[in-house]
Amino acid sequence: MTRKTVGILALVGALVLVGMMLVPRPGSYTPYGTRLLNPRPAYDFTLTSHLGRLFRLSELRGKATLIFFGFVNCPDVCPTTLHELKRVYEALTPQEQGKVQVLMISVDPERDTPERLARYIPFFNPKFLGLTGTPGQIADVAKNYGVFYQKTEATSPTEYEVAHTASVFLLDPKGRLRLIYGSGKTSNTEKLLADLRWLLGE
């Protein structure tokens, strides 16, 4: 083997090594959302949808699900987050959209009836679902997702604000809680898209 041949083989070997370093290895994806090291089945629940029927979370097995806790009278965080989720959802292909569901669970069940949610949720996207229930049902679901909420600035029984955790929870198609996005993290459409496609492709 000539010195020239050895040199060519060394160069080819180096190029192959560089290529291997640049190609992502299976399982090497680093999610944008905060990752649960030990994914667990998400708490299942039954609430009333804005369509007026009982809805159970386990109906969504086979889909990636984004869950947000909010309320109709929310002045800023809720509409902003729902608008950001709308951007993410509408950036998916039609086929991908069929495998993704966005849910908003009301933390203001006294005012957020199914009829009221039906006038609010479709404004962002007609495929999104708004969910409500009795105060006890909502408290139970919120507790199991580690969500805090509390009435504030009350001026009457029907006039008040609701302080609440503004995180978004992402469940994989097997119904496991996989990623959590803190307040403001949903503004990065491309990174959320990448996370969704990663989960859908597992």
Image: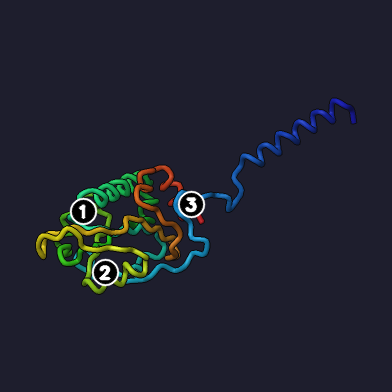
| Residue type at numbered disc 2 | Ile
Q: Give the residue displayed 24% in from the left and 63% down from the top.
A: 150
- Residue 144 x %, y %: 36, 69
Q: Which residue is mark 3?
A: 198
Whichever of labels 2 and 1 marks the residue nearer the N terminus, that label is 1
Asked whether the beta carbons under mark 1 and mark 3 sit within 8 Å of each other, the answer is: no
Count residues near mark 1 (Cα–Cα under 10 Å), then give few for <14, some for 14-19, many for 20+: some
Colouring rule applied to residues: rainbow
Residue 74 circle label: 1
Image quadrant of residue 106? bottom left
Q: Residue at x 32, y 49 (%)?
A: 85
- The answer to whether 16 appears left or right of 53 in the picture is right
Q: Residue at x 30, y 49 (%)?
A: 81
**Three-letter amino acid code at disc 1?**
Cys
Between discs 3 and 2, the one toward the N terminus: 2
> Mark 2 sits on what residue?
138
Q: Are marks 3 and 2 in contact (CB under 8 Å)?
A: no
